[in-house]
Amino acid sequence: MIIKELNLISFGKFESESFSLEDGLNIIYGENESGKTTLHNFIYGMFYGFLRPYVKRRLYLPEYEKYRPWNRKEYAGILTFIKDDRVYRIERNFDKGEVRVYDDITGDDITKYIDMGERVKVHLPGIYFFDFNSIVYNNTISICQLGNRIHQDLSTEVKDRLANISTSFEEDISVKKAIADLEKELEDIGSVRAPTRPYGKTMIELDRLRERQRKAVEKQEEYNRYLKEFNDLKEEIKREKSKVDELQKELRKAQIIEKKKIYDEAIKLKEEIESIDNKIESLKSYSNLSFNDYTRALKLENQYENLNRQIGELRLNIGKAKDKLASLKLEEEGIVDGIKVDDLYRDMDSYSELEDEKNRLILDSKENRLEILNSELKAILDREKRLKSIGRINILLILISLILFFISPPLILLASIPLGIFIYTKKIIATMDEEKYNLNVEIQNIRKEEEERKDRISHIEREEEEILLKYNCGSRAVFNRLYDELRIKVMDLSKRQSEYKETKEYMNKIIEDLQVKEKEIVAIKEELDYIIEKNNSSNMEEFKKGLDKKRDYDNLIKDKERKAEILDRILVDTSLEELRIELNNYDEEYLQMENPTDVSEIMKRIKDKEEDISNMRERYARLGERIDSLNEEIGRLVDIEEEIGRLEKRIEEFDNRIKSINMAKEIIQSISQEIHNQFAPTINKKVGQIISLITDGKYNQVRINDHLDITVENPSTKEIIHIDNLSGGTIDQLYFALRFSIISSLKGERLPLILDDCFIQYDNERLANAMKFLSHISKDKQVILFTCHHREREILEGLGVKYNLINLS
């Protein structure tokens, strides 16, 4: 056999791609994830359809879903190959489970001649063309990456194949199947302890016949009573069926009216979406405004006001310093101009402390923070309102889905979508309630702090006013001047000079601070103006209003998406146009119903009626069976003794058959062991020859038991070593040799050898020997080697071996 072409119409990551193979050695190279294993499994899937072996139902291997294309509905491919000088073509639709086989020369469809599988009645070209099942395929001619170990069922399959080789029967022999068939036949016959099997049933029937012989006289009266009930029930079923037909007509009309309601609701939603689109277009200019920029602008504005206030205070202090420098003079008395100097000093200190505290309170204002929190609270309330609306709509959709369930039970799955959305919405609302509570708590705390701050400022201002009134000063500036004048008057000349110097230094420091803060306020003003201009606003108030419109814009977008989603859920898999066309088939009079009956109510009535009819039919059938039974018993009373004799003879036949089956099982098991003893030396010899070749003679004595377990002889110590005690590379070599020897023993024809990165554990020396072996056998059979390395190609080119290269990278 030679595989010529792989056409992957839609399989795994491949779509509409084909690959041509040649006789001899083929190397399919590709990096990891390039599709090598996909191509390997494509060949397997085309021959065996990814069906699980040894099962009675159609069950698929995981690869069936693994290679299903994501982006296309189609899941299919074509494989072309040559066998016995004829070209064949396999076309398989994996998604539909369909396969067709053609003679590619004549175009004849030969699918009907293909093997239908061991248990599942599905065409399996692999069994027909390879003459073995997928277990043997995957353990002999096909070897996957890190999959050199053989399947546990292979030993049984090998025994069956060897049995065919060692006999001259025309039909295939399966030891496993023969034993299973005999055990199945024993199970089918049963025993006295198995009342559901023929043997037990026959014994029970004998007892029943004897009992019937006693009760036959009593059956006539029972027969007449059942016959009357049988006829009455037949008429009742006819009447109830007529009522169900009327209800079906009523149900159809109610369903059409329900579709009319859906159509009207969908039209309304469509109009609402169009209205929202118009509003969105009118607010589109506000879509790029930034909430982050607004928060930054608020912070800058607050900083600007604070700096402006500080600059004013600095300028005032500079003025005071200048006044002080101009008016410095000395006074010797403790009372100057009728004022006690010590009292004035204490009052001035108190006034300054009060003023500092007031300034700190002013700077600690949280009005801006309160405004931001109120904005966040409003956004949460708006979102909560929308989510509650969605929740009410989901409740409506769940109710609609429950109604549809009575029309078609599978439609109950539609309820899972709105139910999931409803649960998810409830969770979000619960989270939002917690956020809303936290925001309200923080807002209340800030408001309380602001009230306390303002009360304290008012109290400070009253205390300051009392101090100013005490000295008949109209302002802080006047009070400062009075203070400065008195201090100057009480200082001596030297102290006045010292104070003059200190005042001068103090004023210079204030001037420096003023210059720094004036630069800061200019930079803040520039950044604030840039942010306002960037957001298409002329001032903060306009910026704030623009953000409100952006919020409206975002809410409209979400509202549109929500309504569009609701429209899709309402229409499900239909469209407005399809509904309109369907409803046009009915006039307005038909679609009008003063008191329309609920669809679910009609379906319930139909279901109740059908259950009643079903119960009556069951009763009717039981009565018919009982009547037939009674009639038979009454009519065959004379034949009961003859039937008893027949059953006793049947029991004797069962006993003889059971003895024969047990004897056949013993003979078959004995023959199976003899066949293994006959072929084991041949397989051992072939495995030894191959392993000697690819290990450069390191191992040549190999022993394989009837379970295909491998041991080797240490050439130095003659010690028998189990395969599990060898290196990973040697284990791979032994299993490779075993697979090749098994297929050589089972089949005389040229079958391809398919290898998927199975030499990754080989060192360079082992790999070179393996490549020599493959180049040798490729002269007699096709070899397909999948690899992600360049080593194999480099070795083959060094050996001068020709090969066909397919590059997937």
Image (tube, grey):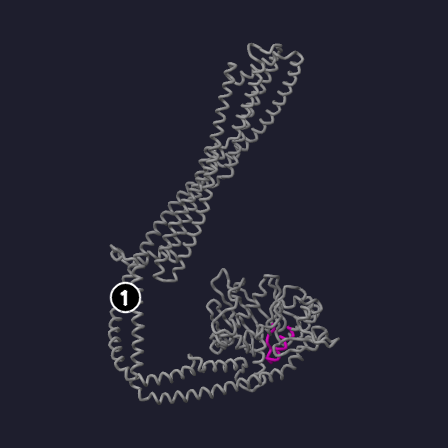
User: Badge 1 is on which residue?
Assistant: 244
Q: Quadrant of the C terminus?
A: bottom right
Whether residue 108 is visible: no
View extreme (right): residue: 716
- Residue located 38% across and 50% down the image: 393
Name the amino acid, label 1. Val
- Residue located 47% across and 43% down the image: 435
**Magenta-span inclusion, residue 752:** yes
Quick check: 3 above or below 433? below
**Magenta-span inclusion, residue 613:** no
Measuring from the top left, give residue 25's x and y in whole percent: 63, 71
Whether residue 47 is visible: yes
Quick check: 479 above or below 761? above
Q: Magenta residues, as a range?
A: 735-753
Q: Main secondary structure of the magenta part?
A: helix
Measuring from the top left, give residue 222's x and y in whole percent: 27, 79
User: Is 527 left or right of 413, judged from the image as shown?
Assistant: right
